Image (cartoon, rainbow, N blue to C red):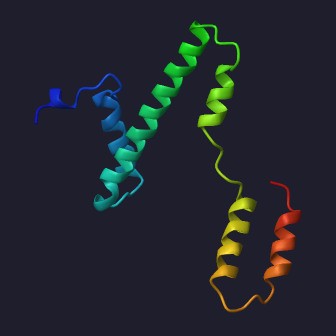
Amino acid sequence: MTQEDYRHPIAPAPELVVQWFDDARNASVSTSDLAIVIATRAAQWGADQELKACCQWLHCHAVTEFAPGDLRAARRLKTPSLKEQALEALAHILNNSSTQLGADTIRRALEQLDD
């Protein structure tokens, strides 16, 4: 396959792909994970470009039912807070463990923390 076979309207510049490769290599990403890291970055970049185009289309066509910020918020969900992740991990432990020693205390303490 040639480079032309990979052309698409939403495609990162070769320099950007090289930057992602260098970033991954500098972060000591293993060779076996390198393709996954770069593919993930490319997918995220492409999704961001598509979202930007959709928001621009909404704005240009004066779609008033939705603000571009509403679309962005709906399509780019926030990462769960550390508290939410800890509660999820605790639930997993409780569901997969034969002991609950101290788990209720930990859960109550986590639920009282701010996000």
- Residue pushed farthest left? 1
Q: Quadrant of residue 67?
A: top right
Q: Nearer the viewer, residue 20 or 1?
A: 1
Q: Is residue 84 above or below residue 9?
A: below
Q: Nearer the viewer, residue 3 or 22?
A: 3
Figure label count: 0
- Residue pushed farthest front? 65
- The spot of residue 111 in percent (x, y) is 85, 65
Residue beneath the point at 89% across and 64% down: 112
Q: Is residue 49 above or below residue 101?
A: above
Question: Left of 101 or right of it: where is 33?
Answer: left
Residue beneath the point at 76% across and 88% down: 100
Question: Left of 114 or right of it: where is 97?
Answer: left
- The spot of residue 33 in percent (x, y) is 34, 58
Residue beneath the point at 81% across and 73% down: 107
Q: Quadrant of the C terminus?
A: bottom right
Residue beneath the point at 41% across and 42% down: 41
Q: Quadrant of the N terminus?
A: top left
Q: Quadrant of residue 58?
A: top right
Q: Quadrant of residue 89?
A: bottom right
Q: Is residue 80 above or below residue 10?
A: below
- The spot of residue 14 in percent (x, y) is 28, 30
Q: Is residue 67 above or below residue 115?
A: above
